[in-house]
Structures are given as C-alpha cells and as structure tokens.
Image (cartoon, rainbow, N blue to C red):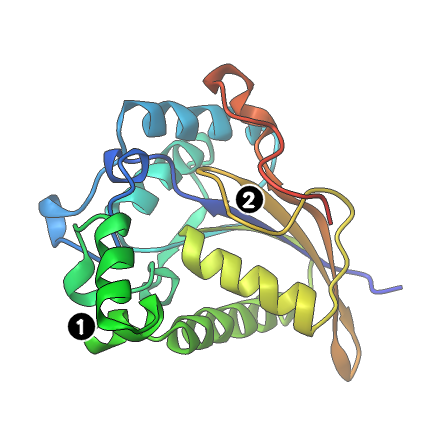
C-alpha cells in the first residue's frame, strides 16, 4: 500500500443570476465586469466552506473568473495559511458570441441554421468541447503529478465550472474506468462537491477512486434537491 495519497475536492462555483435565468456565461467580462455570485450563490459558498472547516487543505487551485474566486474565498478565509493558485485552464468554456445570450436563443439559432449547438458555438468564436477537455485534463494530470511527487499525503481543492468538471468526470469515469462509491455523473449543481482519492502506483498510472460525486448535502437549507440525477 502506498505510504501517501492525494485527496482532490472538486467544487463548482455558487449560483449566479445568469445560472437561474439560463443565460450563457462562459468567460464573459473583465475584472469588475465579470459575472458575480448572487445572494443565493454567496450563501451556498458560505455553507460549503462551513462544511469543510475541519478539512486541512494544503492548496487551493481556482479558476480566475470571479464566480469561482468568490466561491473559494470563504474556504480560503477558513484556512488562512493555505496556498492559492489561480489557473486559466480551469475556466468555463468560451461560448464566443453567444456569451450573455440565453440558451433558448442558442437552441433556436442552431435549429434555424440546421447545425448542432456545438458547431454553431465554434463558428461564432467559441471553444470546441475537445479543447475544453484537453486543457482541463492537462491541468488535472500536471496537478496530480506535482502533488504526488511531493511524497507526502496532501489535500487540495479545485474550484471550477460545471462544463469543465463534467467533461473531466466523464473522461475519468467512462474512459479511465474510475469507480465511484456514491453520487452520480451528470449535471454539476452549484457548489457541488466531488472528492477523488488518488494513490500512486509505482511506475503505473496512479489509482483513483471517487469517494463522492456531485454531493450537495451542505445545501439542505437552500431547498435544492439532494439528488440531481441518476445514481452511478
């Protein structure tokens, strides 16, 4: 058995007004113009941080977009000595010209042009799904290797967005056959928590196990369903 391991706490950002209104956010905005958490999202982030107070985080990796930065803040404030790194590879997918437009508008435009939503997004300056997966997977691979190479057990948080997290989880579960003890694969709710155990295996790729996926038990007071999809 390996003498050390890595625990990765994957977290999606809290709710924004755009989430509740089904408006495409993507990477829209610069600095203070970036999309912010709404009151519910701020409360969700606080509840999540409170549920994680007893977890000793060694490092927090976070998307540099405001809705993730502000979700991570309560966690960082509860762990003032934790190291924090902001990484653009954890950003949401760029939706090009469709950013700040409704999902209904995107669906209608795709029907009218006789193409898929993904193809239309790319034709309007957005990222391909493959590009989002590649940058997210590259981050994950580099991050886990760096952390495991330290040779001691570590616990980290990764604060990102629904799109990249769902793509990464699908890759790990469907392609790499990573098992999951509880939870479900599907849409990632706001502030959902997924915990991955990573254990080095010598010259072989590390062994991985999802201890939980898309867990929202910290949101009992937010009237959010505890189960948002099928179980695995």
* Residue 31 visible from this viewpoint: yes
Q: Position of residue 170 (x, y in %)?
A: 59, 63
Left or right of residue 86: residue 9: right
Crowd around label 1: few <14 · some 14–19 · many ≥20 (10 Å): few
Front tag of 1 and 2: 1
Q: Which quarter shows the N terminus?
A: bottom right
Q: Earlier in the sequence, mark 1 or mark 2?
A: 2
Instruction: Using the image, tell me which numbered label, if any, was put on residue 57.
Output: 2
Query: 205 or 170: nearer the eye?
Result: 170
Q: Position of residue 121 (x, y in %)?
A: 26, 69
Q: Which residue sits at x=82%, y=61%?
A: 3
Q: Which residue sits at x=50%, y=15%?
A: 221
Quarter of the image for residue 176 reads bottom right
* Residue 150 visible from this viewpoint: no
**Secondary structure under the numbered disc 1 in the rendered image:** loop
Q: Position of residue 129 (x, y in %)?
A: 40, 72
Q: Is residue 185 above or below residue 201?
A: above
Q: Position of residue 82 (x, y in %)?
A: 46, 45
Q: Residue furthest bottom?
A: 203
Q: Which residue sits at x=55%, y=28%?
A: 53
Q: Which residue sits at x=77%, y=58%?
A: 179
Instruction: Using the image, tell me which numbered label, if any, was put on residue 23.
Output: none
Report the Cα–Cα distance between label 1 and label 2.
Answer: 40 Å
Left or right of residue 99: residue 161: right
**Secondary structure under the numbered disc 2 in the rendered image:** loop
Crowd around label 2: few <14 · some 14–19 · many ≥20 (10 Å): many
Q: Is residue 96 above or below residue 21?
A: below
Q: Which residue is mark 1?
A: 124
Left or right of residue 115: residue 206: right
Query: 76 or 225: nearer the eye?
Result: 225
Q: Residue furthest right?
A: 1
């Amino acid at each position: 058995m390996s003498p050390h391991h890595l625990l990765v706490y994957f977290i999606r950002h809290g709710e924004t007004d755009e989430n509740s209104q089904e408006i495409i956010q993507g990477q829209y905005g610069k600095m203070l113009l970036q999309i912010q958490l709404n009151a519910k999202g701020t409360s969700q982030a606080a509840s999540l941080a409170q549920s994680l107070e007893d977890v000793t985080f060694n490092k927090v990796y976070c998307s540099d977009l405001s809705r993730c930065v502000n979700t991570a803040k309560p966690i960082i404030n509860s762990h003032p000595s934790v190291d924090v790194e902001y990484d653009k590879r954890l950003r949401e997918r760029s939706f090009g010209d469709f950013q700040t437009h409704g999902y209904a508008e995107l669906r209608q435009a795709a029907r009218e042009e006789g193409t898929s939503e993904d193809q239309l997004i790319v034709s309007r300056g957005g990222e391909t799904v493959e590009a989002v997966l590649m940058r997210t997977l590259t981050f994950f691979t580099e991050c886990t290797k760096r952390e495991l190479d330290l040779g001691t057990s570590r616990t980290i948080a990764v604060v990102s967005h629904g799109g990249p997290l769902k793509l990464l989880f699908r890759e790990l579960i469907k392609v790499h056959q990573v098992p999951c003890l509880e939870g479900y694969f599907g849409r990632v709710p706001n502030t959902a928590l997924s915990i991955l155990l990573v254990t080095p295996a010598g010259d072989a790729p590390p062994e991985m196990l999802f201890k939980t996926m898309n867990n929202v038990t910290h949101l009992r007071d937010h009237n959010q369903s505890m189960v948002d999809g099928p179980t695995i």
